[in-house]
Image (tube, helix red, strand yellow):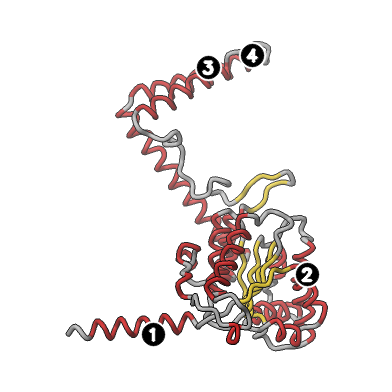
Amino acid sequence: MDNNLALLLKQYAQKKERAENLAVRRKQDLYKKLPALEKLEEDSSSYALNSILTMLNSAGSAKDKNFSKTLNSNKEKKLKLLKENGYPADYLEPDYECKKCNDTGYITTKTGRELCSCIKQDLYNIAYNSANIYDLQNQNFKAFNLNYYSSESDKTKYGVKLSPRENMEKIYKLALNFVEKFDESDTINLLFCGGTGLGKTFLSSCIANELIHKEKTVLYQTAPIMLDKIIDYKFGKSKENIMSSILSADLLIIDDLGTEAQNQLKNTELFNIINSRILNQNNKITKTIISTNLSLDDLNETYDERIISRIIGNYDCCLFYGDDIRMKKKVGKKKWQEKSLAKF
């Protein structure tokens, strides 16, 4: 992680320098078009410098009472000039990718200097997420297609009255609400249950995408890989300690729960993760999404009572059902290919 951080900080410094160099070039080009703007900038700089020198020479006794008023007046004139000529108010400012840290990778808080959420997320992506979440940019709520879910209800087949589409509409709204009210303490975690190919991982990625845009950190792990990494570290088989990241990430997504090899040690570690994040032991609001192909009955048979009780009491259970979307896509693609070939 330290090597990754050093590499990222170097990239951030380069990114910051590029943004500032572009801002300088924009300013120089604009000065040629609007000489009055350059004059205002020069007047403000000269006035500020002279005021500071006067204060220093007089040991601070001759403080300029009009200092702020004059500078604010010049600032308003500059903004007005920009607006009159069709430029946004921040046109002369560097266009940093992260407005929170200005591409430094660090922010200042009440407790001191700490890593910004943007670089934390980049660290997660390098170390963990890149192998797990694919094409995240295209996995968003706009791309989530409810048409893959049948509007025909079948209680005999699915065990409930709602059609797959009606059920998915409810889950979709719950996911949107989860994102919108993420920072509220009474917004509880999500459990996605259901067979393969029903959109559980895709919807998790939609939520992850939205929260990353809200400057939240998201860590994605499959249950087998996550638990193996934790145990390997504990037994000295690996130097990679991911537990601090697991506990501190704003959102933790645990995918494929139930596919890990079962033993008491793994169950203990899983309980510690679920319980610690529920208790918010890092003095911050953290949420978790668990995704599994197991049914609620299967979960109850697979895991001990401590884990099940934490999930039942602190997670909204979302049951996914319907036809395998992956198979629908394959059938649709095959029909399109056959239709295209028929033209020749």
| N-term mark: 2 or 1 | 2
Vertical relation: 4 (above or below) 303: above
**Which circle, 1 or 3, is nearer the viewer?**
1
Per the image, label 3 sits on a secondary structure element best described as helix
Which residue lies under the disc numbered 2?
A: 313
Q: Residue at horizontal 41%, vertical 80%?
A: 329
The amino acid at mark 3 is Thr
Labels 3 and 2 touching (C-beta < 8 A): no
Which residue lies under the disc numbered 1?
A: 331
Pointer 4 local density, CA inside 10 Å: few below 14, some 14–19, many at least 20? some
Kindly tell me whether residue 132 is visible in this rendering: no
Per the image, label 2 sits on a secondary structure element best described as helix
Left or right for 33, reference 75: left
Q: Quick one: quadrant of the C terminus?
A: bottom left
In this view, the residue in front, 66 or 223, is: 223
**Which circle, 2 or 4, is nearer the viewer?**
2
The amino acid at mark 4 is Lys
Which residue lies under the disc numbered 3?
A: 70
Check the image and name the residue furthest to the left: 344
Percent across and percent down for residue 250 are 66, 60
In this view, the residue in front, 58 or 317, is: 317
| N-term mark: 2 or 4 | 4
Labels 1 and 4 touching (C-beta < 8 A): no
| N-term mark: 4 or 3 | 4
In this view, the residue in front, 113 or 306, is: 306
Pointer 2 local density, CA inside 10 Å: few below 14, some 14–19, many at least 20? few
| N-term mark: 1 or 3 | 3
Per the image, label 1 sits on a secondary structure element best described as helix
- Which of the numbered marks, if any, corresponds to residue 63? 4
